């Protein structure tokens, strides 16, 4: 049976549109995330207190150890100690841990097979973006990691709300269509808008929200700084490169970045073919470790 969808199936009146907007469930920021972020903003944060908060959540423990033992942060051998893991990550990166874990927990009610694939890709992409950011492109690795992790978070939230969303994704894969463009044909909002609202709701830096909101705009690399600050463009560019290369390595169709944005991202950082090969090697090495 064909899964091709027509826009008429999702033709909504203004009243329907308002109803859909009001029914999109934007998860609230979990208390533990707020607590940890507040502690980390202090001049002298209490790492032991943070460790206690994280230790009470098995999912957060798993994410903490996985990230601390990853190529992005690993120094020396593997660690199984939360305290040691947090010391290794450093204060700037602890927020990445609680955000990553809480974001996973917020995606309840989504098909487990899809969610497993989504998080596998998101985690791998976040790691790649962080590693690329370490190459002195003026982007903080922790910011690149957080942005890459969040930038498509609106997609599982759309799947929560719209039973038809999985068919839309299937159509994109089959016909090699860009996901955000097809979303705009069938639904009253797209994943960049939802993702930006999620970031604002969770109190994350506005720069991350701006980057999420604009990351599919055709002219984003030409927008004036007052519309899209350079810091946001840098986050987008790092992730465009990381995502394009990751999809290439996984031999998956590119439904997110596109050749034009990839080329502009390389030009934005002045990356030549030799540097691009070096970035590929860094990501491949990290994946194999």
Image: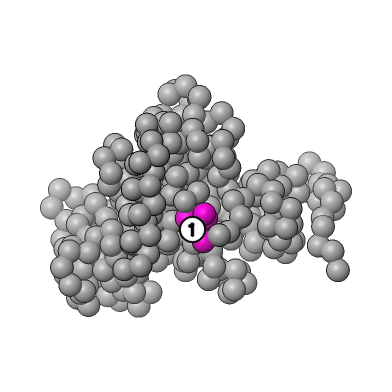
With 114 as the anchor, is 54 left or right in this view?
left
Q: Is residue 119 above or below residue 206?
A: below
Instruction: State the residue in front, 125 or 163.
Output: 125
Mark 1, Cα crowd under 10 Å, few <14 / some 14-19 / many 20+, is few
Measuring 58% from the left and 42% from the top, which residue is drawn there?
258
With 17 as the anchor, is 50 left or right in this view?
left
Measuring 31% from the left and 68% from the top, which residue is drawn there?
289
With 182 as the anchor, is 155 left or right in this view?
left
Q: Quadrant of the N terminus?
A: bottom right
Residue farthest to the front, as pictured: 274
Measuring 22% from the left and 64% from the top, which residue is drawn there?
74
Q: Is residue 107 above or below residue 203?
A: below
Q: Quadrant of residue 165?
A: bottom right
Q: Secondary structure at mark 1?
A: helix
Q: Which residues are magenta?
A: 246-250
In the image, residue 247 lies in the stretch drawn in magenta:
yes
Horizontal and vertical percent position of residue 269: 37, 33
Instruction: State the residue in front, 64 or 233.
Output: 233
């Amino acid at each position: 049976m064909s899964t091709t969808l027509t826009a008429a199936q999702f033709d909504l009146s203004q009243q329907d549109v308002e109803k859909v907007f009001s029914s999109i469930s934007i998860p609230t920021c979990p208390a533990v995330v707020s607590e940890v972020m507040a502690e980390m903003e202090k001049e002298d944060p209490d790492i032991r207190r943070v460790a206690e908060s994280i230790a009470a959540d098995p999912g957060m423990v798993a994410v903490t150890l996985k990230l601390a033992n990853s190529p992005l942060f690993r120094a020396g051998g593997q660690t199984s100690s939360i305290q040691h893991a947090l010391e290794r990550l450093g204060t700037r990166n602890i927020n990445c841990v609680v955000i990553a874990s809480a974001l996973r927990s917020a995606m309840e009610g989504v098909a487990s097979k899809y969610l497993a694939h989504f998080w596998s890709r998101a985690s791998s992409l976040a790691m790649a973006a962080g590693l690329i950011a370490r190459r002195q492109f003026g982007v903080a690795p922790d910011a690149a990691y957080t942005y890459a992790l969040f930038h498509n978070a609106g997609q599982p939230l759309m799947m929560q709300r719209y039973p038809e969303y999985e068919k839309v994704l299937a159509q994109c894969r089959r016909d090699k269509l860009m996901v955000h463009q097809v979303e705009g044909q069938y639904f009253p909002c797209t994943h960049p808008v939802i993702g930006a609202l999620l970031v604002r709701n969770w109190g994350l830096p506005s720069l991350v929200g701006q980057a999420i909101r604009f990351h599919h705009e055709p002219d984003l690399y030409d927008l004036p700084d007052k519309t899209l600050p350079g810091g946001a463009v840098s986050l987008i560019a790092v992730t465009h490169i990381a995502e394009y290369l990751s999809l290439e390595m996984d031999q998956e169709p590119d439904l997110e970045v596109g050749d034009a944005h990839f080329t502009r991202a390389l030009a934005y950082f002045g990356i030549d073919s030799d540097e691009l090969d070096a970035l590929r090697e860094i990501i491949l090495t990290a994946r194999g470790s």
